[in-house]
Amino acid sequence: MSTDKITVSGPARQSEIYVKGAMGAKPIVPFDPYKLEQAAKDKMNANAAGYIIGGAGTDETIRENRSAFAKHRIYPRMLRDVSQRNTSLELFGDSLPAPILTCPIGVLEMIHEDADKAVARAVSQLDIPMIISNQASYSMESIVSEMDGSTRWFQLYWSKSNELVESLVRRAEKSGCSAIAVTLDTTMLGWRVQDLDLMHLPFLRGQGIAQYTSDPVFNNIVAEMDFGAESMIVPGVDPEEFKAIKAFTGVYSRPSITWEDLKFLRDLTSLPILLKGILHPEDASLAIAHGVDGIIVSNHGGRQVDGAIAAIDALPRVVEAVNKENSNIPILMDSGIRTGADIFKAIALGARAVCVGRPYAYGLALAGQQGVVEVLSNLMAEFELTMALAGCSELSEINKSCLLSNN
Ligand SMILES: Cc1cc2nc3c(=O)[nH]c(=O)nc-3n(C[C@H](O)[C@H](O)[C@H](O)COP(=O)(O)O)c2cc1C
C-alpha cells in the first residue's frame, strides 16, 4: 500500500487524467458526485447503504444541504493573474495544503475492511487532516499508526461517564491529535428511516465501538456491570461482545449535557476545542462566551433532524454572530460539500475550511485507500481551478464579493 506523499495541483491533475485516458485508463472513481454516490451504493450491501447514505426522516435535510448551495452563484472576475495559486493555510498551528479536512465517519468497516486505517493512509499521503471518529472501526492508536505524522484531530461524543471522556481525551493527546471536536448534535440518534426499515443498527452488531473496547475505563465499566443471565440469551452473539455492546448502549451519550459541562473539558485539556453541530447564531455566541476555540457548522449530514436548516444557510449567520463577538475563532463547515465549487462558496461565506464527509466514504467503498485519495484529490483540484477561474489566487481573496447570493 503506497504511502508516497502526493501534492495536488489542479491543472496538473487534470492533464494527468486526460493523458492516462489517452493511454486507455478508466477513472478509479466517478468524477460526478452523484454518479460517485450511485456507484458506491451499487457496491454496498443494503445495511451499509442504509447507514452510510441514509438520513433522518424523509431526507429533506440532505436535499436541502445540496439545494441551498444554489442560492449562491460564483461571480468570476477576469484579468487577475492567476498563474500562481496558493490554497494552503494554517489551522491551530498545523499547515494544510487546502482548506479541507475529513469528517469523522463512524463504522466504516461496513464498507471496507481497512476502514479508518485506509482513510488514515490516504489523508496522510495528501497531508489532509483527519478527524478521527469516536465511533471508528479501529482504535485511535491503530489509526494513527497508519499515518506519517500528518495532522489528526479526535471527535468526541460526550459519554455518560466523565472518566471515559477523560480517558478518550488523554488517549487523543497521546495519539498526537491537535484538536478535539465535540459533536453536540447526537445526544440521541435521529429517526433514520432506512435503518429502521432494515431494523439494523451497526453498533448492536458490535461494529463501530472500537474506541470503547480499546479503552481501559470502558473495560472497567464492562467488568463492573451486572448482566445477570442476559448475556446467554442473544442467539449468535458472543457473550463477551454482547457485554461490550450492552455497556456501550448504556454509556455512549449524555443527553443531559449543557453549556456548563464544557468547563470540565476545558479544564481537562489544553488542546483546542471545537464544537461540531452548531447551527444557530445564538449558540455560536454562547460558544464564544464559553471559551471554545472553533466551531464546525454542521447538521450531521442530515442524519439527525429532518427538515433542519441547511448547513450552508447556517454558516453566514454563525459567522456574523462570531464577528459580533469580535472573535476570530475558525469556523469550519460540513454537510453537503460535494464539489470544489461548494468549497469555494463555503470559504466565500466565511468558513476557514470545510470537512468532507460521505464522498470520501464512497471512495473508500469503491477502491479503498486509493479511492479516498482519488476523491480528495479531485476535490482539491476542482477547488483550485474554481478559485483561479473566479479570479482568486489566495484564499484571503475569496469573500462575499465573489458570490451573487439570493436568500
Ligand atoms: C455514515 C456516517 C457516519 C457518521 N459518523 C459520525 C461520527 O461518528 N461522529 C460525528 O461527529 N459525525 C459523524 N457523521 C457526520 C459527519 O461527520 C458529517 O457531519 C456529515 O457526514 C456531513 O454530511 P455529508 O457527508 O453529507 O457532507 C457521520 C456521517 C455519516 C454519513
Image: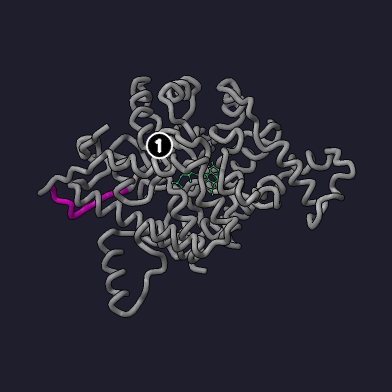
- Looking at the image, is 235 positioned above or below residue 274? below
Residue 360 visible in image: yes
Give how far across and how far down residue 280 sits, in percent.
43, 26
Instruction: Report the coloring of the rendering.
Output: one colour
The part of the chain drawn in magenta is: 80-87
Residue 145 visible in image: no
Q: Is the magenta stretch mostly helix, strand or loop?
A: loop
Answer whether residue 81 is magenta in the image: yes
- Looking at the image, is 288 positioned above or below residue 315? above
- Say what amino acid the circle numbered 1 marks: Ala
Callout count: 1
Answer whether residue 167 is magenta in the image: no
Give how far across and how far down residue 346 sits, in percent.
33, 40
Q: Residues within 10 Å of mark 1 (few under 14, many from 20)?
A: many
**SS class of the residue under badge 1?**
helix
For this view, does 396 lie left or right of residue 268? left
Tell me what residue is drawn at x 65 percent, y 30 percent. Answer: 254
For this view, does 40 lie left or right of residue 234? left
Give how far across and how far down residue 57 sits, in percent.
52, 40
Quarter of the figure with residue 167: top right
Q: Which of the image's four quarters has the C terminus? A: top left
Give how far across and how far down residue 234 sits, in percent.
81, 51
Give whichever of 98, 389 is nearer the camera: 389
Give whichever of 130, 76 is nearer the camera: 76
Give whichever of 54, 216 is nearer the camera: 54
Instruction: Say if disc 1 is inside 8 Å of ligand 1.
Output: yes
Quarter of the figure with residue 251: top right
Tell me what residue is drawn at x 57 percent, y 56 percent. Answer: 48
Tell me what residue is drawn at x 68 percent, y 31 percent. Answer: 162
For this view, does 371 lie left or right of residue 240? left
Which residue in the protein does label 1 denote? Answer: 311
Give whichever of 267, 71 is nearer the camera: 71
